[in-house]
Amino acid sequence: MEDFKSLESVFSLSNGVKMPCLGFGTWQSSDGEEAYNAVLSALRLGYRHIDTAAAYGNEKSVGRAIADFLKESSVRRSDLFITTKLWNEDHGYENAKKAIEVSLEKLGLDYLDLYLIHWPNPLKFRSCWQKANAESWAAMEEAVDAGKIRAIGISNFCERHIDELLKTAKIKPMVNQIKVCPGQPQKQLADYSRSLGMVVEGYSPLGTGGIFKNAEIQQLAEKYGRTVAQVCIRWCLQQGVVPLPKSVNFARIKENSEIFDFMISEEDLEIIANLKNLEIRPVRNPDEADF
Ligand code: A2P
Protein backbone atom coordinates (compact mmCIF):
# COMPACT_ATOMS: atom_id res chain seq x y z
CA MET A 1 0.00 0.00 0.00
CA GLU A 2 1.15 3.52 -0.74
CA ASP A 3 1.89 5.59 2.33
CA PHE A 4 -0.86 8.14 2.79
CA LYS A 5 0.27 10.68 5.35
CA SER A 6 -2.32 13.44 5.31
CA LEU A 7 -5.31 14.96 3.59
CA GLU A 8 -2.87 16.26 1.01
CA SER A 9 -1.63 12.82 -0.02
CA VAL A 10 -2.82 11.90 -3.48
CA PHE A 11 -3.70 9.16 -5.91
CA SER A 12 -2.48 9.77 -9.48
CA LEU A 13 -5.06 9.31 -12.20
CA SER A 14 -3.98 7.78 -15.52
CA ASN A 15 -3.62 11.23 -17.13
CA GLY A 16 -1.42 12.50 -14.28
CA VAL A 17 -4.15 14.48 -12.48
CA LYS A 18 -3.71 14.19 -8.71
CA MET A 19 -6.68 13.26 -6.53
CA PRO A 20 -6.48 13.91 -2.77
CA CYS A 21 -6.73 10.52 -1.07
CA LEU A 22 -9.70 11.31 1.18
CA GLY A 23 -12.78 12.94 -0.28
CA PHE A 24 -15.74 14.58 1.37
CA GLY A 25 -19.15 13.15 0.50
CA THR A 26 -22.28 15.28 0.17
CA TRP A 27 -24.98 12.75 -0.72
CA GLN A 28 -28.01 13.45 1.48
CA SER A 29 -26.67 16.85 2.59
CA SER A 30 -29.59 19.18 1.97
CA ASP A 31 -29.23 22.13 -0.32
CA GLY A 32 -28.96 25.41 1.60
CA GLU A 33 -27.21 25.96 4.92
CA GLU A 34 -26.67 22.27 5.65
CA ALA A 35 -24.58 21.47 2.58
CA TYR A 36 -22.96 24.94 2.63
CA ASN A 37 -21.83 24.64 6.25
CA ALA A 38 -20.69 21.04 5.83
CA VAL A 39 -18.50 21.79 2.81
CA LEU A 40 -17.12 24.99 4.31
CA SER A 41 -16.27 23.11 7.52
CA ALA A 42 -14.60 20.33 5.56
CA LEU A 43 -12.49 22.79 3.58
CA ARG A 44 -11.52 24.69 6.74
CA LEU A 45 -10.49 21.38 8.32
CA GLY A 46 -8.19 20.60 5.41
CA TYR A 47 -10.25 18.40 3.08
CA ARG A 48 -9.34 19.32 -0.50
CA HIS A 49 -11.52 16.83 -2.35
CA ILE A 50 -15.29 17.39 -2.50
CA ASP A 51 -17.74 14.99 -4.12
CA THR A 52 -21.19 16.09 -5.23
CA ALA A 53 -23.64 15.23 -8.03
CA ALA A 54 -26.40 16.92 -9.98
CA ALA A 55 -28.77 14.40 -8.39
CA TYR A 56 -27.87 15.49 -4.85
CA GLY A 57 -29.53 18.83 -5.59
CA ASN A 58 -26.88 20.72 -3.62
CA GLU A 59 -24.38 21.91 -6.25
CA LYS A 60 -25.27 25.57 -5.66
CA SER A 61 -24.60 25.37 -1.92
CA VAL A 62 -21.43 23.34 -2.49
CA GLY A 63 -20.27 25.96 -4.99
CA ARG A 64 -21.05 28.80 -2.60
CA ALA A 65 -18.99 27.13 0.15
CA ILE A 66 -16.06 26.65 -2.24
CA ALA A 67 -16.21 30.29 -3.38
CA ASP A 68 -16.37 31.62 0.19
CA PHE A 69 -13.52 29.37 1.29
CA LEU A 70 -11.30 30.51 -1.60
CA LYS A 71 -12.06 34.13 -0.63
CA GLU A 72 -11.24 33.69 3.06
CA SER A 73 -8.11 31.53 2.68
CA SER A 74 -4.89 31.48 0.69
CA VAL A 75 -5.84 28.14 -0.85
CA ARG A 76 -6.13 28.28 -4.64
CA ARG A 77 -8.76 26.71 -6.84
CA SER A 78 -6.03 24.48 -8.28
CA ASP A 79 -5.44 23.02 -4.79
CA LEU A 80 -9.00 21.69 -4.73
CA PHE A 81 -10.44 18.62 -6.41
CA ILE A 82 -14.13 18.94 -7.23
CA THR A 83 -16.29 16.12 -8.60
CA THR A 84 -19.83 16.12 -9.87
CA LYS A 85 -21.89 13.61 -11.87
CA LEU A 86 -24.22 13.28 -14.84
CA TRP A 87 -27.73 12.39 -13.70
CA ASN A 88 -29.85 9.64 -15.22
CA GLU A 89 -32.25 11.97 -17.02
CA ASP A 90 -29.41 13.66 -18.88
CA HIS A 91 -27.77 10.87 -20.83
CA GLY A 92 -27.04 11.27 -24.55
CA TYR A 93 -24.71 13.66 -26.38
CA GLU A 94 -26.73 16.89 -26.38
CA ASN A 95 -28.20 16.36 -22.92
CA ALA A 96 -24.82 15.57 -21.38
CA LYS A 97 -23.24 18.63 -22.99
CA LYS A 98 -25.96 20.77 -21.45
CA ALA A 99 -25.75 19.01 -18.07
CA ILE A 100 -22.02 19.75 -17.84
CA GLU A 101 -22.71 23.46 -18.42
CA VAL A 102 -25.52 23.47 -15.85
CA SER A 103 -23.31 21.84 -13.22
CA LEU A 104 -20.46 24.27 -13.91
CA GLU A 105 -22.89 27.16 -13.61
CA LYS A 106 -24.47 25.89 -10.37
CA LEU A 107 -21.07 25.20 -8.82
CA GLY A 108 -19.78 28.57 -10.01
CA LEU A 109 -16.66 26.92 -11.44
CA ASP A 110 -14.72 27.35 -14.69
CA TYR A 111 -13.76 23.69 -14.72
CA LEU A 112 -14.43 20.41 -12.93
CA ASP A 113 -11.66 18.14 -11.73
CA LEU A 114 -13.72 15.02 -12.26
CA TYR A 115 -17.02 14.31 -13.96
CA LEU A 116 -18.66 10.89 -13.68
CA ILE A 117 -21.56 9.09 -15.33
CA HIS A 118 -23.57 8.50 -12.15
CA TRP A 119 -25.33 5.23 -13.11
CA PRO A 120 -24.75 2.97 -16.12
CA ASN A 121 -28.32 1.93 -16.84
CA PRO A 122 -30.95 4.59 -16.07
CA LEU A 123 -34.57 3.52 -16.27
CA LYS A 124 -35.17 6.14 -18.96
CA PHE A 125 -32.53 4.59 -21.23
CA ARG A 126 -32.93 0.94 -20.25
CA SER A 127 -33.50 -0.30 -23.77
CA CYS A 128 -30.47 1.59 -25.13
CA TRP A 129 -28.07 2.12 -22.23
CA GLN A 130 -25.02 1.16 -24.30
CA LYS A 131 -25.71 3.92 -26.81
CA ALA A 132 -26.71 6.40 -24.10
CA ASN A 133 -23.41 5.87 -22.24
CA ALA A 134 -21.36 6.05 -25.46
CA GLU A 135 -22.98 9.36 -26.42
CA SER A 136 -22.72 10.86 -22.96
CA TRP A 137 -19.09 9.83 -22.90
CA ALA A 138 -18.43 11.56 -26.25
CA ALA A 139 -19.80 14.79 -24.77
CA MET A 140 -17.57 14.34 -21.72
CA GLU A 141 -14.51 13.74 -23.92
CA GLU A 142 -15.28 16.93 -25.79
CA ALA A 143 -15.48 18.82 -22.50
CA VAL A 144 -12.05 17.43 -21.56
CA ASP A 145 -10.63 18.65 -24.86
CA ALA A 146 -12.23 22.05 -24.26
CA GLY A 147 -10.59 22.33 -20.81
CA LYS A 148 -13.87 22.21 -18.91
CA ILE A 149 -13.11 18.89 -17.18
CA ARG A 150 -9.72 17.54 -16.11
CA ALA A 151 -10.67 13.88 -15.70
CA ILE A 152 -13.68 11.71 -16.55
CA GLY A 153 -14.96 8.50 -15.10
CA ILE A 154 -17.90 6.34 -14.17
CA SER A 155 -19.86 5.40 -11.08
CA ASN A 156 -21.75 2.23 -10.17
CA PHE A 157 -20.49 0.56 -13.35
CA CYS A 158 -20.07 -3.23 -13.20
CA GLU A 159 -17.75 -5.24 -15.44
CA ARG A 160 -20.32 -5.55 -18.24
CA HIS A 161 -20.99 -1.79 -18.34
CA ILE A 162 -17.28 -1.00 -18.37
CA ASP A 163 -16.58 -3.44 -21.22
CA GLU A 164 -19.36 -1.90 -23.28
CA LEU A 165 -18.14 1.67 -22.74
CA LEU A 166 -14.57 0.73 -23.66
CA LYS A 167 -15.76 -0.31 -27.13
CA THR A 168 -16.32 3.34 -28.09
CA ALA A 169 -14.38 5.44 -25.55
CA LYS A 170 -11.47 7.44 -26.95
CA ILE A 171 -10.43 8.51 -23.46
CA LYS A 172 -10.39 5.58 -21.03
CA PRO A 173 -12.31 6.13 -17.78
CA MET A 174 -9.96 7.27 -15.04
CA VAL A 175 -12.16 6.54 -12.03
CA ASN A 176 -14.90 4.13 -10.98
CA GLN A 177 -16.82 5.32 -7.92
CA ILE A 178 -18.63 2.42 -6.28
CA LYS A 179 -20.07 1.58 -2.89
CA VAL A 180 -17.35 0.25 -0.59
CA CYS A 181 -18.16 -0.40 3.05
CA PRO A 182 -17.51 -3.06 5.71
CA GLY A 183 -19.03 -6.35 4.56
CA GLN A 184 -19.30 -5.01 1.00
CA PRO A 185 -15.70 -4.46 -0.19
CA GLN A 186 -16.53 -5.13 -3.88
CA LYS A 187 -12.98 -6.42 -4.31
CA GLN A 188 -13.52 -8.09 -7.66
CA LEU A 189 -15.03 -5.01 -9.27
CA ALA A 190 -12.39 -2.76 -7.68
CA ASP A 191 -9.61 -5.01 -8.99
CA TYR A 192 -11.17 -5.15 -12.45
CA SER A 193 -11.51 -1.35 -12.55
CA ARG A 194 -7.90 -0.94 -11.44
CA SER A 195 -6.69 -3.46 -14.01
CA LEU A 196 -8.09 -1.09 -16.64
CA GLY A 197 -6.24 1.90 -15.23
CA MET A 198 -8.94 3.38 -13.01
CA VAL A 199 -8.64 4.71 -9.48
CA VAL A 200 -11.47 3.37 -7.34
CA GLU A 201 -13.46 5.65 -5.07
CA GLY A 202 -15.71 4.29 -2.32
CA TYR A 203 -18.96 5.97 -1.38
CA SER A 204 -20.89 5.13 1.80
CA PRO A 205 -17.77 3.90 3.67
CA LEU A 206 -19.86 4.06 6.85
CA GLY A 207 -22.65 2.08 5.23
CA THR A 208 -24.71 5.30 5.10
CA GLY A 209 -24.63 5.26 8.90
CA GLY A 210 -25.62 1.58 9.18
CA ILE A 211 -22.28 0.38 10.57
CA PHE A 212 -22.36 1.97 13.99
CA LYS A 213 -24.40 -0.60 15.91
CA ASN A 214 -22.21 -3.56 14.95
CA ALA A 215 -20.45 -5.06 17.98
CA GLU A 216 -17.48 -6.52 16.07
CA ILE A 217 -16.52 -3.21 14.51
CA GLN A 218 -16.96 -1.53 17.90
CA GLN A 219 -14.48 -4.02 19.38
CA LEU A 220 -12.01 -3.35 16.59
CA ALA A 221 -12.36 0.38 17.12
CA GLU A 222 -11.56 -0.15 20.80
CA LYS A 223 -8.55 -2.29 19.91
CA TYR A 224 -7.09 0.51 17.77
CA GLY A 225 -8.16 3.28 20.17
CA ARG A 226 -10.17 4.90 17.35
CA THR A 227 -13.79 5.50 16.57
CA VAL A 228 -15.85 3.15 14.40
CA ALA A 229 -15.96 5.77 11.64
CA GLN A 230 -12.17 6.18 11.66
CA VAL A 231 -11.62 2.42 11.42
CA CYS A 232 -14.06 2.13 8.48
CA ILE A 233 -12.50 5.04 6.59
CA ARG A 234 -8.97 3.80 7.24
CA TRP A 235 -10.02 0.29 6.15
CA CYS A 236 -11.28 1.69 2.87
CA LEU A 237 -8.07 3.64 2.23
CA GLN A 238 -5.82 0.69 3.11
CA GLN A 239 -7.48 -1.27 0.32
CA GLY A 240 -6.38 1.41 -2.10
CA VAL A 241 -9.88 2.87 -2.35
CA VAL A 242 -10.48 6.63 -1.97
CA PRO A 243 -13.05 6.97 0.85
CA LEU A 244 -15.83 9.56 0.51
CA PRO A 245 -17.42 9.76 3.97
CA LYS A 246 -20.36 12.13 4.36
CA SER A 247 -21.21 14.17 7.43
CA VAL A 248 -22.92 17.47 8.18
CA ASN A 249 -21.59 17.64 11.75
CA PHE A 250 -18.39 19.61 12.41
CA ALA A 251 -16.99 17.26 15.07
CA ARG A 252 -17.67 14.22 12.91
CA ILE A 253 -16.22 15.84 9.78
CA LYS A 254 -13.06 16.45 11.81
CA GLU A 255 -13.04 12.95 13.31
CA ASN A 256 -13.40 11.41 9.85
CA SER A 257 -10.28 13.20 8.63
CA GLU A 258 -8.07 11.95 11.48
CA ILE A 259 -7.13 8.60 9.99
CA PHE A 260 -3.52 9.06 9.01
CA ASP A 261 -1.71 7.99 12.19
CA PHE A 262 -2.65 4.34 12.54
CA MET A 263 -2.57 1.13 10.50
CA ILE A 264 -5.06 -1.70 10.51
CA SER A 265 -3.45 -5.18 10.36
CA GLU A 266 -3.99 -7.40 7.29
CA GLU A 267 -5.94 -9.82 9.45
CA ASP A 268 -8.32 -7.14 10.67
CA LEU A 269 -8.75 -5.75 7.15
CA GLU A 270 -10.09 -9.18 6.18
CA ILE A 271 -12.36 -9.37 9.22
CA ILE A 272 -13.89 -6.00 8.33
CA ALA A 273 -14.32 -6.99 4.67
CA ASN A 274 -16.17 -10.12 5.72
CA LEU A 275 -18.48 -8.70 8.41
CA LYS A 276 -21.97 -10.18 8.18
CA ASN A 277 -25.45 -9.25 9.34
CA LEU A 278 -24.88 -5.54 9.09
CA GLU A 279 -27.79 -3.15 8.90
CA ILE A 280 -26.55 -1.90 5.55
CA ARG A 281 -28.47 -2.11 2.30
CA PRO A 282 -26.79 -4.50 -0.18
CA VAL A 283 -25.05 -3.11 -3.25
CA ARG A 284 -27.71 -2.20 -5.80
CA ASN A 285 -27.81 -3.98 -9.15
CA PRO A 286 -27.67 -1.03 -11.59
CA ASP A 287 -29.65 -2.99 -14.17
CA GLU A 288 -32.59 -3.22 -11.78
CA ALA A 289 -32.52 0.25 -10.22
CA ASP A 290 -35.91 1.94 -10.38
CA PHE A 291 -34.52 5.34 -11.39
P1 A2P B 1 -24.15 13.09 9.95
O1 A2P B 1 -24.14 13.68 8.58
O2 A2P B 1 -25.26 13.61 10.81
O3 A2P B 1 -22.80 13.15 10.64
P2 A2P B 1 -21.70 7.38 4.67
O4 A2P B 1 -20.51 8.25 4.59
O5 A2P B 1 -21.40 5.92 4.68
O6 A2P B 1 -22.74 7.71 3.63
O7 A2P B 1 -22.40 7.64 6.08
C1 A2P B 1 -23.01 8.87 6.39
C2 A2P B 1 -23.85 8.72 7.62
O8 A2P B 1 -23.02 8.47 8.77
C3 A2P B 1 -24.63 9.96 7.95
O9 A2P B 1 -25.84 9.57 8.55
C4 A2P B 1 -23.73 10.70 8.93
O10 A2P B 1 -24.50 11.51 9.79
C5 A2P B 1 -23.12 9.54 9.71
N1 A2P B 1 -21.75 9.84 10.19
C6 A2P B 1 -20.75 10.39 9.48
N2 A2P B 1 -19.62 10.44 10.20
C7 A2P B 1 -19.92 9.92 11.40
C8 A2P B 1 -19.17 9.71 12.59
N3 A2P B 1 -17.88 10.02 12.66
N4 A2P B 1 -19.82 9.17 13.67
C9 A2P B 1 -21.13 8.84 13.60
N5 A2P B 1 -21.89 9.00 12.50
C10 A2P B 1 -21.29 9.54 11.41
Image (cartoon, rainbow, N blue to C red):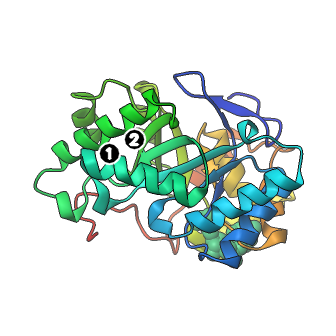
246 lies above or below 153: below
The N terminus - image quarter:
top right
Disc 2 Cβ-to-ligand 1 distance below 8 Å:
no
Q: Position of residue 54 (x, y in %)?
A: 46, 61
Compared to residue 139, the image places residue 58 above or below, namely below
Separation (CA) of disc 2 from disc 1: 7 Å
> Regarding mark 2 in the picture, which secondary structure is present there?
helix
Q: Position of residue 279 (x, y in %)?
A: 52, 75
Query: With 63 as the anchor, is 225 left or right in this view?
Result: right
Name the residue: 25% across, 33% down: 163
> Residue flagged by tag 1: what amino acid is it?
Cys
| Nearest the eye: 90 or 147 | 147
From the image, tell me which residue sits under label 2: 189
Q: Is residue 200 visible to the viewer in this orientation of the structure?
A: yes
* Residue 254 left/right relative to 110: right
> Which numbered disc covers residue 193?
none
Q: Residues within 10 Å of mark 1 (few under 14, many from 20)?
A: many
The residue positioned 83% from the left and 36% from the top of the image is: 5
> On the rendered image, what quadrant is the C terminus found in?
bottom left
Label 1: which residue? 158
Front position in the image: 44 or 250: 44
Is label 1's Cβ within 8 Å of ligand 1? Answer: no
Residue 52 visible, this angle = no
Which residue reaches farthest left?
127
Q: Position of residue 130 (x, y in %)?
A: 18, 43
Dots 2, 1 in contact, CB < 8 A:
yes
Residue 78, percent from left and from top: 72, 36
Mark found first going from the N terminus, 2 or 1: 1
